[in-house]
Amino acid sequence: MVVSIAIIIGGFYLYFKDDISQKNIEKDLLKFRPIIVSNGILDDITDDFMEATVAETAVVNEGNTVNAETTNVSVINTIPDEVRKSLVESAQSLNEAYPDAIGWLYIPNTNISYPVTQGRDNEYYLSHAFDCRSLKSGAIFLDCRCENRFMNPVNLLYGHSMKNGTMFAGVLNFADSSYFDSHRYGWLATPEAVYRIDFFSCAKTDCNDELYDGNTPISEWIPHICEKSAVLRGIEYTDNDRFISLSTCSYEYENARTILTGKLVETNGG
C-alpha cells in the first residue's frame, strides 16, 4: 500500500510539475511586473482609447490605409509623464537583472502580461523562462533576427499556446471578431520607450509564411497580411512605421499559426 501511495504521489507530481514550476516562476516575476499594470492605471488609459474608437464599414481602401475600420485615436500618443516614467523604469530594472529581458508586453483584460526576452537563437526560450530556468511553457521572445529594441519594420514575438491559458494562448481568442473589437490595444514597455500597440489584424497561416520575414518592405507586407487575415481592422500607416506580430501555434491544420499584429505607436509623456 505504501508503495502504491508513493507511485500515485509521484505520478501526481510529474503530471503537475510543469504547472507548479510555472507558478513558482510567475511569483518570482511579480517584483518586476510594472506597478502601473498591477494597479490598473494602464487599464484605465486603454479604456479611454477604446471609447475613442469609431467603428465604420468593413472596407479595404487603396493607399496607405487599411480601412476595414478606422479610428480617431491614431494621432493620440500622449500618456501621463509618471505613467511613462514608471513603465520605462520597470523595464530597466528587469533588463538590469536579466539582460535577455528586453521589455514587458501587456494586453489589458487578457492573461498576456509577460517580459519579452531575446536569445541568440529561436530555440532557447521555447523551453526556458525569462530567468533561464528550464520551463516547458518557455518565455515570450523576440525573433533573434530582429533588432533588440524593436526597430525592425516588423518585430516578431513567439510564445506557446498553453492549455492552461497562459503565455500566448490568449492570442487565439483574437480570431473572433467580437473579442478582437473589445481588445484593440496593447502596450510594450522597453528600457527606452513605451509603445501603444494598435491591433488591426489576426491572421491564420503556416510556420513558413513570408510574414515571418521581419525585413519585408511594408509596402509588400501589408497586402500580404491583409490577404491572410481572419479579422482585419483599419490602420493608417507609412512606410516608416513599425509593427509587432504575436505568433503562436494553432490547430486548424498541420503547422498552423495564429498571428496577432498591431502598429507600434511610441508614446510621449504629457
Image: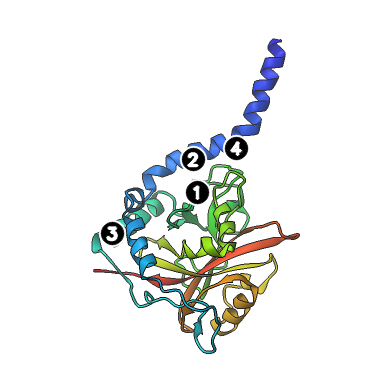
The front one of 178 and 196 is 178
The answer to which of marks 3 and 1 sits earlier in the sequence is 3
Whether tag 2 and tag 3 are in contact, CB under 8 A, the answer is: no
Residue at 66 percent of width and 57 percent of height: 250
Identified by mark 3, the residue type is Val
Which residue is situated farthest in the front direction here? Answer: 57
Which quadrant of the figure contains the N terminus? top right
Residues at marks 3 and 1 touching, judged by CB atoms closer than 8 Å: no
Of pointers 1 and 2, the one earlier in the residue sequence: 2
Helix, strand or loop under label 1? loop
Name the image quarter holding the C terminus: bottom left
Query: What separation in Å lies between label 3 and label 1 (alpha carbons)?
Result: 24 Å
Q: How crowded is mark 4: few (under 14 residues within 10 Å), some or many (20 or more)?
A: some
Q: Name the residue under label 4.
A: 18
Which amino acid lies under the numbered mark 4 shown in the image of this protein?
A: Asp
CB atoms at circles 1 and 2 under 8 Å apart? Answer: yes
Q: Where is residue 102 in the image (x, y as percent from the top left)?
A: 44, 58
Label 2 sits on a secondary structure element that is helix
CA distance for labels 4 and 3:
35 Å
The residue indicated by pointer 1 is 130
Residue 144 is at least partly visible in this image:
no
The tag on residue 83 is 3
Q: Mark 2 points at which residue?
A: 25
Q: Where is residue 265 in the image (x, y as percent from the top left)?
A: 40, 72
- Disc 1/disc 2 C-alpha distance (Å): 9 Å
Looking at the rendered structure, the kind of residue marked 2 is Ile
Q: What element carries label 4?
A: helix
